[in-house]
Amino acid sequence: MNTTTRLARRGVRRGLALAVGSLLAVGAAASSAVTPATAAAPPRNGIVCTKGDTGAAPGQPVFNLTTRTGYIDLPDGNTSFMYGYSSGFDAFQHPGPVLCVKENDTVTVILHNTLDVPASIVFPGQEDVLADGVPSQPQFAGTGFMTSLAQPAAAGTGTVTYTFKATHAGTFLYESGTDPETQVRMGLFGALIVRPTDSDSQAYDDAKTAFDPSEEFMVLLSEIDPYQHAAVEQHKAFNLNNYKARYWLINGRGYPDSIADNYASWLPSQPYGSLATVKPYQPDNTKPGYHPLPGMARYLSVGSEDYPFHPHGNNGLVVGRDGRQSTALSSGGEDLSMEKFAINIGPGQTWDVIFKWYDAEDYSTANPVTVTVPDLANQVVGTFYSGSPYLGNTHDLPPGIQTLNQCGEFYIISHNHALFQITSWGVTMTGPITYMRIEPPEPNTCP
Amino acid sequence: MTSLETQRSRDVAEGPSGGIAGAGRLRMSRRRALGLTGSAAVVAGAASWAGKVLLPEQVAEAAGAPANLYLAGTDGWIHLPAAPAIPPFHPDPLGLEEGVGKTTYIFGFRNVTGMTTAQRLAQKYHAQHSAPMFWVDEYDGNQAHEFRVQLTNLGLQLRPDLFDAHTLHWHGFRNVIPFFDGEPSGSISVRAGGEFTYVYRPRDPGTYMFHCHVEDVEHVHMGMTGLVFVRPAQNRTGAGSGVPVSRLGGNTAAGAPMGYLYNDGNGSTRYDREFAMFLSEVWAEVHWADAHIQLPEWSDYRADFALLNGRVYPDTLEANGPGVNPFDVEAGRTFAADGNLIAPAGREDLKHQPISSLVNCIEGERIALRFANLGFRESAMTITGMRMRVVGRDATPMRGRTSATSEHDGADTSYETDTLNIGPGESYDVIVTAPPKTGSGDYDTYFLYNRSFSRSNNLADGGFGGQATQIRVHGSGSGAVKPGPQAFPNDWGFSA
């Protein structure tokens, strides 16, 4: 683990703590005051890459991952006991760190197990993975009973070193191969991003998959049966036939925590937010707000059934799945990417989705909506509404109504459309919900 | 009167009208006029209270254009098979007191286009499921052709303790501002007694769905869901030789297709009939709980009933109610004098489930089936004896692309299948070609059903139920009994 990065993170947490009570102050200005100038603070929104140990040879990144136990906060006020992969030797976090490597890198992942059970890592989608220098393979007890999908690290103090060459760009999972129906659900999973040789701001080695690097997001979907987690915590047996998810999470958080910043101080072990802050797509460089590249959402699922994720307001262009670009295998290699408004992601799948948002009607005060806006007394106003239909505008709200809107920005929701799954053991409108936050074109008054 | 008030008054005075001639315009009631005056006074007070000058920014020039469709949100009851029972949730004893065969409490939409104020207000507690299906022509750039849907909220008769607002979320509509998206957090929603007009300029043909997005988990499951689709410009323009203007586009020539699903450029999505197949589910406990002021545990979710256009088989075979075409409205003919729905003949219990799923067609015809799923489970819709060609999904034609900026102009990715796995919030456009009629009766029967069998039964062994219907292929000969042209989607083509 890179020490300076860790220090920077702690700095950000302190910065956020100081800023509590001043909504506008939360952010780069507050955190940069305590961040070493040489270390880039992690972004407030978007993917936080863990790049491995400093000092590793070029093209040969090394990651230390430590299994730990800890607790996460859930939207109904409950907490859940978890396993997790920590970055380096850090404290528990959930989900595991986002490992970012380059296509054709030789990747080393050293697992340090502190759990009281053996644990391992498998890398679905990677080929020729070695464990301590020999092929990573399923492990069997003498009777043929399979004990692990890969060589595990022994309970307590065991270590295994996994290596592989990341031959395909794309989005991948890594997860425990040992007792996975318990350990993966307990939280031993994370994302691996392999960036293409051509460019870090493309999904694949194809310019058609280019995206704006400031608008890259992770949507990692998971679920929790609290009884299973309580049983593991109390070293009690759990009948897996009784498994029933009661919580569903996005990047290890439920809404509204899901839209809090990366490393929000009140979520000390759930570092990854999922708010997608973007600017309107504007491919014309003669117009204000020139912004020619789309955003990129990397979907991953470790759930036990298909999750139908639905981003409002824009159709994602599915440019790849499971770390393979959506192109035909024929010699023409035709582009088979497809637009969808339902991202039906199955267990273990990853989907690479490029998206853009713009107001198709270019509404503004000069080009107003063609309806009468109900007068204030007749409006039921949403938490994020600016008081105005127009991007970058704010307007009066009904007396006594407060908004979280800061500068006339838009908020457009994305959520799981199996709607009983956007609940948290009975609390509705929580779970895997996030928003796309659309910033007004600059200059704007956004903090 | 300020210009702002003038504008408002004009809007209300003109009111919404139906999308067809003769639908008539609504008049402003005295009660409503008084309400508006009162509201304006409140606004002025609010502005001075806030210490700001109230700018008339939000009042638009063209704000007075009439609505093409007028929907109302409210509650009501529908019919599902009473046996076997799911005590104590199904059949709900409250429903049996409310009308013939009513078993299940719902929230839902109604089409109140062309109604008088008295008729409209009387639709409280008369929701339907699935919601009124509607369709729109692809926007041609002429602002006069934008599609305007006015929404009112009639309140919940059985739950006066719930003062829930409603919205209209057109699921899948691209690049829309939050103001017209219907997701309440980022916008405004319609309180009981309120009105709001959503404006759509649909540029992407295909099949979509819509639902209320307030208390999404509850309002969607309770039934505020329906299907909407966009017809392509190619219907009106054709696409060169061999791809004529369609009948929907005004072509009366024999042999012209009824329409196209997409701007395919080659006629590959042409069809002779079209049917919407809207999928939804009922978990009896939730519907009972809402009627009895209880709260469910949503993570226990189960689909007790799986519905096709708001009914379960064999009710799916019953006739359309007379008001299924939302743009053809007339008191006494498409809705009753009191504004309520008119039940399909002989099925009073299906009065608030007006949409038929029976497919009547003629051998050799190309049938467009538009599927959308707003249940919470994936459905596996299967047809025995016919292959479905998937030509669109999520309102996107099955085509690759040739450049970073192009859209669906590349390789043909359509495919044939027996089974569509349709996830929640997903849509499919398929074409089936009716095979030759070989049987001796008036028609051959094919079956369309959910291959997830627990959702093609009605909780009982033996026989089909749930998400299932029939496709009846009639002969084409001059003496054959066969349907005439469709007047609207899901129309049987029989005058009876």
Image (tube, coloured by chain):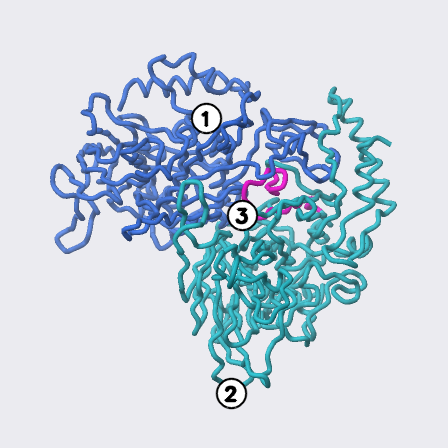
Chain colours: A blue, B cyan
* Residue type pointed to by label 3: Gly
Horizontal and vertical percent position of residue A214: 42, 28
- Disc 2 marks which residue? B440
Q: Residue at x 18, y 48 (%)?
A: A138
* Residue type pointed to by label 1: Trp
* Magenta highlight: main SS: loop
Would you say residue B162 sits in the magenta stretch? Answer: yes
Point out which mark residue B172 bears.
Answer: 3
Residue under disc 3 on the same chain as residue under disc 1? no
| Mark 1 secondary-structure assignment | loop
Query: Horizontally, is B286 left or right of A127 in the view?
Result: right
How busy is the neighbourhood of tag 2: few (under 14 within 10 Å), some, or many (20 plus)? Answer: few
Read off the chain for label 3.
B
Count of numbered badges drawn on the protein: 3
User: Disc 2 versus disc 3: distance between alpha carbons?
Assistant: 44 Å
- Disc 1 marks which residue? A266
Horizontal and vertical percent position of residue A447: 53, 20
Read off the chain for label 1.
A
| Mark 2 secondary-structure assignment | loop
- Residue A271 can be seen in this image: no
Give above or below for A155 relative to B161.
above
Point out which mark residue A330 bears.
Answer: none
